[in-house]
Amino acid sequence: MPTYGLPQALPMPQKFLLLSAFSSSLVLLGLAPTALAQDIGADPLYGTANLEAGFLPDPHTVTVSPGGLDEVSGLGSSCIGYIAGDRPDYDLNYSADSAVLGIFVNSDIDTTLVVNDPRGNWHCNDDADSLTDANPGILFNTPLSGNYNIWVGTYRENAVSNATVLAITEYGEDEWASLSLGDSSIESIAVVDGIDFGDNSSIWANDGECDDPRFEGNGMAMPTSADDSRRDASDCLELYESGSIRLIGGFIDGIDFGDDTSTWANDGECDDPRFTGDGMASSLVESDLYHDASDCIALYQAGSIQLIVDAEDQTAGNVIRGSLAAGDETSDDNSYVDRYRFNGVAGGTAVVDLRSGNFDTYLTVRTPAGGELVNDDYENSFDRSLLTIDSLESGVYEVLVSSYSAGETGGYTLDIGTITAAPGTSILEYSGSLTSGDNEFADGEYYDSYVFEGAPGQRVTLDLRSDDFDTYLIVQSPAGENPKTMTPIALTIVRLLWKYRNLVCMKSMSLLMAALKPETTI
């Protein structure tokens, strides 16, 4: 998992004091990350076409908004222009035979085309010889069966189009210019912050909800359809300007602020660790990535916080930012589904945490042996599902992200962490109970204390659990500081599973601690 303020070294092993005051189980384990296998390309913004050779009507068309902030020259010598690289504009699942496959664009501006084929090869074009007005196209003479990820870019950064159509056809390239693409032109009502809101041609226009699937937030209709992309302009524009919705993938300077599902949302401080500045909370945890949008937006616009350089890229460890959208795979109950995988090691523990402010989350984990674990509402919260899997078996685990109700869409975060007792890891485990006669804080809370040794560069995890009361945890640094006042170096040595608090209380407890080797990182 990503870390912030990583220390270079400490001069010698240090002792940390743990104070507890509740009936609980406290676990301190070395956290070892595992790589996540994911299909190339994220969920497509404008949907997915499932076509077989000989499909009708031909051409198959979809209206898109081209361009983005990501320059594509690094993909190959023929690649040029700007796309929204975090997710494809469109996906094509194609069953080939002897027919050719053409993908081209018709637009009122200078566009470019980027395609990733089923073998993972990149294909780019700026201007197709058979097309006019600087429109791009790519012809596959012997197309492969499988998934094609498609981006429609712009030749110039920040260019805006009022009418761009992506076409998929089995006609030869010399016939593309003469093909009828239907009435795909859209007279845009408004373009704000570089977002083309389109027109009001949706049957759901002017109903007070945004039906455009390019957006997410509390003002969204549920479910949405790709057919309504750029066709509910008045509703979406009003909700966007009020802050009730945001463009998926970022709407302020390309930053995706996420939702407000953090416990600390709307408290006037930004708790998202991707940011820094005077408006930040004094202690941060990675579970709040993307989940304190309103606070962070207000402070960002006021100039009180700034995005840490490359912070969006740094979140690509265990924290995944995804979205359920029309065109995704569906389950038996017609809920949209995204799939992820991680490797488990026998005897370890995995924690899988799904959060969304846009839909009622539903989490499924399938084990290597074929078992299935599910969680709907973690701690009675509709916007969070969490599974802790103890005593892992070795092998590949599959994680299914979906919604409780059919057709729900929107953004989410998925955090997959694995805890292993690797060689060089020391484990300490305690059980106890808080009773009268124990040490007391000034306000009368009982507590027990424990000590463990740390060494330069170590990472540790503390897990305190109790079925008898609301657990509360304190960690004091070697200098006697608690996490609210510890230096950034000390803060990175101890990673709590809860937001850092000033005090911690335990009553009846079990404590497990493991310190990692110095070269091991979270």
Image: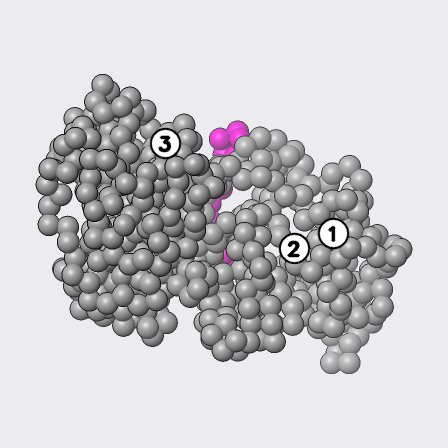
Above-or-below relation of 477 to 266:
above
The segment highlighted magenta reads 367-381
Q: Which residue is mark 2?
A: 3
Tell me whether circle 2 and circle 1 mark residues in contact (CB < 8 Å): yes
Look at the numbered disc 2 and give the secondary structure of its residue: loop
- Where's residue 194, x and y in %? 33, 63
Q: Between 143 and 354, which is closer to the camera in this rendering?
A: 143
Q: Residues within 10 Å of mark 3 (few under 14, many from 20)?
A: some
Q: Quadrant of residue 112?
A: top left
Q: Position of residue 107 (x, y in %)?
A: 21, 49
Residue 507 shows in this picture: no
Foreground disc of the pair 2, 1: 2
CA gap between label 2 and label 3 equals 35 Å
Label 2 and label 1: CA atoms lie apart by 10 Å
To which residue does mark 3 refer? Answer: 117
Would you say 465 lies left or right of 301 here?
A: right
Which mark is in front, 3 or 1? 3
Residue at 77% across, 44% down: 519
Q: Which quadrant of the structure image shows residue 211?
A: bottom left
Q: Earlier in the sequence, mark 3 or mark 1?
A: 3
Q: Earlier in the sequence, mark 2 or mark 3?
A: 2
- Taking the image as shown, residue 31 lies to the left or right of residue 165, namely right
The x, y position of residue 42, in whole percent, is 41, 44
Helix, strand or loop under label 1:
loop
What residue type is disc 1 on?
Answer: Arg
